[in-house]
Amino acid sequence: QITLIADKLGTPSLDDLKRVVSQEARRFVLAMQPRPGVRWADLMPGASPMLIDLVSKLLVYDSDRRLTASQALRHEAFADFFEEDAPEVQPAPCPFLA
C-alpha cells in the first residue's frame, strides 16, 4: 500500500521517515525507487483550485503538517457548511508514529 501512496504523494522525505516507528517499514521505504508524486490537478481534472488546496493539505505524510479535522472543516472549501461556533475536535494519537 505504501507503494501506491508514494506513487501519488511521492517518496516520503527523510524527515517524514524519522517519525515512522517500524524499522521494517522505514527500510522498505528507503529501498523504494524515488517517486516524484503526481500533481493533484492532474489527478483531479476539473477540480477547483480551492479543492486541490484542501486535498494537498490533507494528504501529507507528516501528521504535524497535515490539517486536523477541525482545520479542514474551517477550510474555504467548506465555507458554505461550516459553523463558526462548532466545537473543536481534538486529534487522537496515532499508534504508528513516535
Image (cartoon, rainbow, N blue to C red):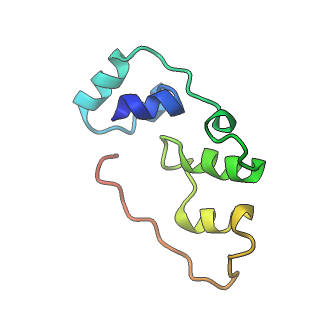
Residue 7 position, x and y percent, is 47, 27
Residue 31 position, x and y percent, is 33, 16
Residue 30 visible: yes
Most extreme residue toward the front, as rendered? 46
Q: Which one is nearer the viewer's eye here, 50 or 42?
A: 42
Going 54% across and 61% down the picture, which residue do you hit? Answer: 68
In the image, residue 51 sits, relative to residue 35, either above or below, namely below
Q: Which one is nearer the viewer's eye here, 84 or 41?
A: 41
Residue 55 position, x and y percent, is 61, 49
Looking at the figure, which quarter contains the N terminus? top left
Q: Which one is nearer the viewer's eye here, 3 or 69?
A: 3
In the image, taking residue 54 as reference, residue 3 lies left or right, namely left
In the image, residue 31 sits, relative to residue 91, either above or below, namely above
In the image, residue 64 sits, relative to residue 21, either above or below, namely below
Going 61% across and 83% down the picture, which residue do you hit? Answer: 86
Going 39% across and 65% down the picture, which residue do you hit? Answer: 92
Quadrant hosting residue 30: top left
Residue 85 position, x and y percent, is 66, 85
Residue 12 visible: no
Going 62% across and 44% down the picture, which residue do you hit? Answer: 56
Q: Which one is nearer the viewer's eye here, 1 or 70?
A: 1
Circle count: 0
In the image, taking residue 7 as reference, residue 54 lies left or right, namely right
Most extreme residue toward the left, as rendered? 24
